[in-house]
Amino acid sequence: MTTFALIGAGPGLGLAAARRFGAAGHTVALIARDAEKLDGLTATLARDDVQARGYTADVLDIESLTSALYAAAADLGTVEILQYSPVPRADFMKPVLDTSADDLDAPLSFSVKGPVTAVNAVLPGMRELGRGTLLFVNGSSAVRPNPRVAGTSVAFAAESAYARMLHDALVPENIHVAQLIIPGAIRPDAEHSSPDVLAERLLDIHQLRDGFRHYAEPLPD
């Protein structure tokens, strides 16, 4: 059995994705900063007969993130699918004219160093398997810069570039890299952007392997 590793586990999309990939036959590694929250999520998944385990790590802390992913693979099985979808901090979202160079340090670590660290931790296992999927989940500022949220606009664009380069470089190795853009808020009542619908979409991206960038719904004009 292989593992679905979710970085940025939470009660919305994270829980829905864990449930869906677990139902598809994968063990689930939940990675987040809050150990108590992880305990609650794993208990919820256990009631759905999903084998899951939580690992505490901060994406801004390279050592903790690497250790969590290594431990997950050792405990649960090789990571075949990695989803990188932590929620950005509110202080990443300053207007562009109020953003200093120092204000970009944390967003870039969050959206570039974090993904690079995670990929480097799981890629050897995927290569041994001969297959794998790397899923990056971003908001619309990844493709349409928003001057009201400069930090995430700059950092998500950099994450997108990294993911696109990975996509092109790893195709020959049967490792699929894809990005899902979610333009609006994730809401239980949203037709295209509810947690359950998005989780199904992520599983489809993993299984169909049909291109790099996908949209939960069209970008508003």
Image (cartoon, rainbow, N blue to C red):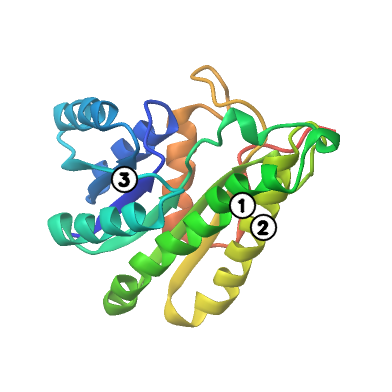
The residue under label 3 is 21
Which amino acid, mark 3?
Phe
Q: Which mark is residue 119?
A: none
Secondary structure at badge 2 equals helix
The residue under label 1 is 108
State the separation of the CA atoms marked 2 and 1.
Answer: 8 Å
Q: Which mark is residue 158?
A: 2
Give the x, y percent position of residue 121: 35, 66
Q: Which badge, 2 or 1, is on the more N-terminal residue?
A: 1
Q: Quadrant of residue 48?
A: top left
Front residue of 73 and 180 = 73
Mark 2–mark 1 CB contact (< 8 Å) = yes
Which amino acid, mark 2?
Ala
Query: Which mark is in front, 3 or 2?
Result: 2
Q: Which residue is at the far bottom?
A: 172
Query: Which mark is in front, 1 or 3?
Result: 1
Which amino acid, mark 1?
Leu
Left or right of residue 87: residue 37: left
Please tell me which residue is depicted at 55% across the width and 52% down the height of the picture: 109
Q: Is residue 153 above or below residue 92?
A: below
Please tell me which residue is depicted at 55% across the width and 78% down the height of the picture: 169
Give the x, y percent position of residue 170: 50, 76
Image quadrant holding the N terminus, namely bottom left
Front residue of 200 and 34 = 34
Give the x, y percent position of residue 30: 29, 42
The image shows a total of numbered marks equal to 3
Secondary structure at badge 1 equals helix
Can you see residue 209?
no
Give the x, y percent position of residue 44: 21, 26
